Amino acid sequence: MISRLKQNNTVINFFSVLIYLFPLSIIIGNFYSNLIVTACSLFFFIYSIIKKKENFNDIFFKIFLVFWILIVARSLFTSEILFSFKSSFFFIRYALFCLLIKFLIINNKYFLKNFFNINVVLVTFISIDALIQFYFGKNLFGTLSSQIENNRISGVFGKELILGSFITKVAFILFAINSIKKNNYYNFFLIIFFFLIVFITGERASFFLFTIGIFYSFIYLKDKKIYLYSLIAALIVLTVIIISKDSVKKRMILQTYNQLYYENNINNNQPKKLFLFSEGHQVLILNSLNMFYQNPIIGIGPNLYRFECENKKYFISGKYYPNFGSGKDLINHCNTHPHNYYVQILSETGVMGALFIFFALIKFIIYSIKNLLSQIKKAKFISQYKVFISAAITINLWPLITTGNFFGSSAANLFWLPVGFFLATFDSSQKKNF
């Protein structure tokens, strides 16, 4: 009996260490983060079967399984079977990865504490490194900001501009775990610091999502005063940075305005055009929606935008997009993905696949509204852990934003990380903890 307990603890500790190191693996390289996700998923699947654990008796997993079967089946009837099948078949690993995190939170009482202690140091370090690059033009590893596109701040990620996205996705998990300790002043510091770092990276989508996360949290927190102070302090510092740094002002304000509200200098007879994100992103989205309109039920196939974007039947009119055509031409914009999760899922999996992400969005909106009504009518507030981890899910599900590739591993690794922490809040054994 004792040997079985020791063996079980060894397995749990092994899994725990891999998850502790997962954020670091994203920084080191996509290969290592994929290795951890795949290894964890495979070993957890085997472990659950051998131990006859009921880890798969979970509504999230059951719904995910149906979605997975659907996208795998669709991949088998595409023009690029091997490429699409590889993307869809291994997608199941993310469901297992989320269940593993939930399992560890329930079965390892030190998991949350250790995850926080390791990763708050990690995120703080890379934030300080980014701050050094911002002010001195070079980070601790010798990466020059002048070598990065538009002098952007990428820190430890080099030429890969995902520092802001990484901090945004991990930070709210850290806020949630730290709130269990009731250490509001520490969260006060972390929120301001990480908020400012995301801003100086120049990643506008990440900064917008971080802001959404802060406002979501503010609505549901019982003690709003200290977080209001955090917001005011952050805005004051942001104003100082904008005034003192022309590069930040140009990227975050002027360039944003110019991309959203484009004036056609080629044909002055045309009025200014308001874009949803930017001219390029709007062409991507409209090309994708064309794919959906012509393949409404099952889409073009998972992860196949990069191939189908060259097909002329999905081109759009270039009338309002002078950078892509003469105005009379039909135009397209090819990329690896459409840069929006909802549009990508619609175009690549059709209504059948989109039902699942829209179902998740609607369920989460209902969950949030119920909590808000309970707060207003009964003065019953959800825990700070639930507030911040729900904010992390809000960031994931926010529809009107540019995103990475839903079926690509680098974006998916960050997307699915908070989900396991969120799922654990619904376990009956964890009600006292959360």
Image (cartoon, grey):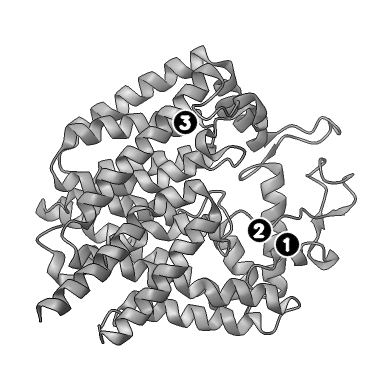
Of labels 1 and 2, earlier in sequence is: 1
Badge 3 crowding class, 10 Å Cα cut-off, few under 14, some 14 to 19, many 20 or more, is many
Q: Amino acid at mark 1?
A: Arg
Tell me the quadrant of the picture where the C terminus can be found.
bottom left
Tell me the quadrant of the picture where the N terminus can be found.
bottom left
- The answer to whether 21 appears left or right of 114 in the picture is right
Question: What residue sits 41% from the left and 63% below the top?
Answer: 361
SS label for mark 2: loop
Q: Which residue is mark 3?
A: 199
Q: CA distance from mark 2 to mark 3?
A: 25 Å
- The single residue placed furthest to the top in the displayed view is 244
Q: Which residue is mark 2?
A: 337
SS label for mark 3: helix
Question: What residue sits 51% from the left and 33% below the top?
Answer: 155
Question: What residue sits 90% from the left and 50% below the top?
Answer: 328
Q: Which residue is mark 1?
A: 306
Question: What residue sits 63% from the left and 82% below the top?
Answer: 74
Question: Do the residues under discs 1 and 2 have CB atoms within 8 angstroms?
Answer: yes
- Work out whether residue 319 or residue 112 is closer to the camera in this orientation and state it: 112
Q: Position of residue 338 (x, y in %)?
A: 65, 57
Q: 130 above or below 223?
A: above
Query: How many dots with numbers?
Result: 3
Q: Amino acid at mark 2?
A: His
Badge 1 crowding class, 10 Å Cα cut-off, few under 14, some 14 to 19, many 20 or more, is few
